[in-house]
Every structure is written in structure tokens, then in C-alpha cells.
Amino acid sequence: MKTSRRLPWMLFLSGTLIYVMGLWRVCPLLSGKGYFLGVLMTGMFVTYAYQHAKNCHQNDECFSLVCQMVALITTGLLLVGIWNAPLSPFEKGLYPAAFVMGLVGQVLLLHPQKNTQSDNP
């Protein structure tokens, strides 16, 4: 089923592109651009590490807690950065939503697909 594989890619690409391109345009300083790119990369890395360990049946309680802690810190850094950036109220809602949309797309991409095509000829 091709639609089930296109949706995670569309979520991942559109979320990350809206986030990166929008904040790149808005942030006047290179340090602000690097800050938001670092937040995105940290969020992507922690979701990838957690999903990979979960798919390989290698995550334990300590690893899960560390991943949750890093995810909460990353979310806090994103919200503090968005709060202090010179953005309109619409953009202050758009960029966190794009961040979450990109992470959800990545989680769906890494989720193991079950082969449910029983009507193959």
C-alpha cells in the first residue's frame, strides 16, 4: 500500500522544511539559526535513538528515562527560543507544530511496517 508509506514522508519533510525555512528566514543572527537547528537535530536524534532501540528490543528502563528527559529538555529549549524570538503569534504556534509534525513523521517512518497485503495475485 503506497499511501501508507507516503504519509510519514510527507509529514517528516513538510514539518522539517516549514520549521527550518521559516526560522531561517525569521532569525536575524547566525547564532539564532544554529540554536533552532540544534534543537531540531537533538529532537530528531533522541526520537531516532529511542525508536531504533525499541525496534531492536534493546531499550531498558534507564535508556527510556534518559530519552524522555532529553526530549523534555529539547521541547523546553524550543519553547523558550520561540517565546524570545521576534515572531508573530501565528508563527509562535506554527513552528512548534511543524517541529512536532516532523518528529511524528520520523517516528512513523521508523515504525516497523506489517505486510498486510493479502490480496496479491
Image (spheres, rainbow, N blue to C red):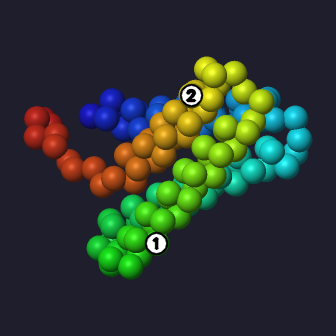
Q: Secondary structure at mark 2?
A: helix
Q: Position of residue 93 (x, y in %)?
A: 56, 28
Side of 4 where 9 appears, left or right: right
Query: Eyeballing the image, is 110 above or below 7?
Result: below
Residue 12 visible? The answer is: no
Side of 24 where 81 appears, left or right: left
Q: Nearer the viewer, residue 75 or 47?
A: 75
Classify mark 2: residues with Cα within 10 Å, few (<14), some (14-19) or many (20+).
Answer: few
Query: Eyeballing the image, is 74 above or below 104?
Result: below
Which dot marks residue 39?
Answer: none
Classify mark 1: residues with Cα within 10 Å, few (<14), some (14-19) or many (20+).
Answer: few
Q: Earlier in the sequence, mark 2 or mark 1?
A: 1
| Residue drawn at 29 percent across, 73 percent down | 57
Disc 2/disc 1 C-alpha distance (Å) = 27 Å
| Residue drawn at 40 percent across, 54 percent down | 110
Query: Eyeballing the image, is 4 above or below 66?
Result: above
Q: Position of residue 45 (x, y in %)?
A: 55, 60
Question: Can you say which quadrant of the picture contains the N terminus?
Answer: top left
Residue 37 visible? The answer is: yes
Q: Which residue is mark 1?
A: 66
Question: Can you say which quadrant of the picture contains the C terminus?
Answer: top left
Q: Position of residue 47 (x, y in %)?
A: 47, 58
Q: Nearer the viewer, residue 18 or 84?
A: 84
Q: Which residue is mark 2?
A: 93
Side of 107 where 44 appears, left or right: right
| Residue drawn at 56 percent across, 36 percent down | 96
Amino acid bearing label 2: Gly
Q: Position of residue 37 (x, y in %)?
A: 71, 48
- In the current view of this chain or complex, which residue is farthest to the right? 29
